[in-house]
Image (cartoon, grey):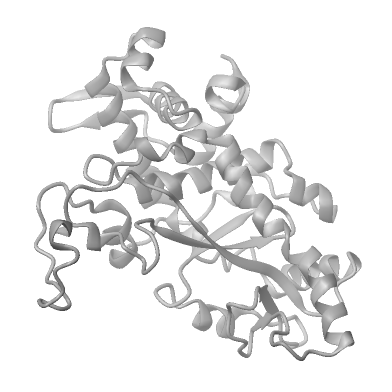
């Protein structure tokens, strides 16, 4: 098994299967096909590793196209339902002592502000332009979905959307040091400062000290960009927008599962972030822990796809510029 094709070595795949707690058999009830857990994970990894067609995988591995498509989706759905809590907030592992250690590590890299634990940023993922129901994916600028992430010094990513995820409540509940000191996440000027969110100074008339602060903090915030690059580098299928067809694929689900698998890749092959901050990531056993949670809203957002026509009401019936959007 070549790591180029699957992003993990032969030994790592077996280790990862055990850590992910995959069932022995991935079974599709629709047409009663099944694959063992090793083959199912390899199908998913190969599918995400590079933007190749399903017919190419059939030539390479003898996997029939519809079989590969179904098993890949089912494996991704299992990984999301089983481990989605790790991309929300892992309160068992991210203890006040651990968060304080992250803050001390960032301060040691030259941060002029104390108590910063992680950086926050967002990214746009291009998708194939849908022929129908374009308003579903219109974000106000492009027809692209948005993903937000928090990046820690050990190189692990947490996925959140600021308003929908309740991030502010998470910060208020958990971002405190062992002695009750307030801890922060740091973002660019687009973020509004709050009790636990710190951002760059903005405006046309900032003083020199504020400019110096911005310059130093920009170097601290930069690693979150590295993590977005890491996901795109490890799983290049996500970069090929022509493959990201929301009427055919659960694009959001694949991206979030890719983040989970990238975190696993970071554990087995430490990333640029962990080396930059000299902070080792946890082991696979330490990271993949805890029981699955029932979270209806994230499940709906990530698993549902507009497979057929969806009636989307127009905001303004008098606006005739986008008649072909629905």
Outermost residue to the front: 321
Image coords of residue 14 (percent x, y)? 55, 25
**Split into 4 quadrants, where in the image is the N terminus?**
top right
Determine if residue 234 is in view. Answer: yes
Number of marks in the rendered image: 0
Residue 161 in the figure: left or right of residue 135: right
Determine if residue 113 is in view. Answer: no
Image coords of residue 263 (percent x, y)? 60, 46
Residue appearing at x 76%, y 45% in the figure: 272
177 over 135 or under it: above or below: below
**Split into 4 quadrants, where in the image is the C terminus?**
bottom left
Q: Quadrant of residue 95?
A: bottom right
Q: Nearer the viewer, residue 103 or 218?
A: 218
Image coords of residue 317 (percent x, y)? 10, 76
Q: Nearer the viewer, residue 136 or 42?
A: 136
Residue 94 in the figure: left or right of residue 20: right
Residue appearing at x 53%, y 41% in the figure: 261
Q: Nearer the viewer, residue 74 or 127?
A: 127
Residue 299 in the figure: left or right of residue 10: left
Q: Nearer the viewer, residue 234 or 285?
A: 234
Q: In which quarter of the image is residue 53?
A: top left
Image coords of residue 309 (percent x, y)? 9, 52
320 over 10 or under it: above or below: below
Residue appearing at x 42%, y 49% in the figure: 126
């Amino acid at each position: 098994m070549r790591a180029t094709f699957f992003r993990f070595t032969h030994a790592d795949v077996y280790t990862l299967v055990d850590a992910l707690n995959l069932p022995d058999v991935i079974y599709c009830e629709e047409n009663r096909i099944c694959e063992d857990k090793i083959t199912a994970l390899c199908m998913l990894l190969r599918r995400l590793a590079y933007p190749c067609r399903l017919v190419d995988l059939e030539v390479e591995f003898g996997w029939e196209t519809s079989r590969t498509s179904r098993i890949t989706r089912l494996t991704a759905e299992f990984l999301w339902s089983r481990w989605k809590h790790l991309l929300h907030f892992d309160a068992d592992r991210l203890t006040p002592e651990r968060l304080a250690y992250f803050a001390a590590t960032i301060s040691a890299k030259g941060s002029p502000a104390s108590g910063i634990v992680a950086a926050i940023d967002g990214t746009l993922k291009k998708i194939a332009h849908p022929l129908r129901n374009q308003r579903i994916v219109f974000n106000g600028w492009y027809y692209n979905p948005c993903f937000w992430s928090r990046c820690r010094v050990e190189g692990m990513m947490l996925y959140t959307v600021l308003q929908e995820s309740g991030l502010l409540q998470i910060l208020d509940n958990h971002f405190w040091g062992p002695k009750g000191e307030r801890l922060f996440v740091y973002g660019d000027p687009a973020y509004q400062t709050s009790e636990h969110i710190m951002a760059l100074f903005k405006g046309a008339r900032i003083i020199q000290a504020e400019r110096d602060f911005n310059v130093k903090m920009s170097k601290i915030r930069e690693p979150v960009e590295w993590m977005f690059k890491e996901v795109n580098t490890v799983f290049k299928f996500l970069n090929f927008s022509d493959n990201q067809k929301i009427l055919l694929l659960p694009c959001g689900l694949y991206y979030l599962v890719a983040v989970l698998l990238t975190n696993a890749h970071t554990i087995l092959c430490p990333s640029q972030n962990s080396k930059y901050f000299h902070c080792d990531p946890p082991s696979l056993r330490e990271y993949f822990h805890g029981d699955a949670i029932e979270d209806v809203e994230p499940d709906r957002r990530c698993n549902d796809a507009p497979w057929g026509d969806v009636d989307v009401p127009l905001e303004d019936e008098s606006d005739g510029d986008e008649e072909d959007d629905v």
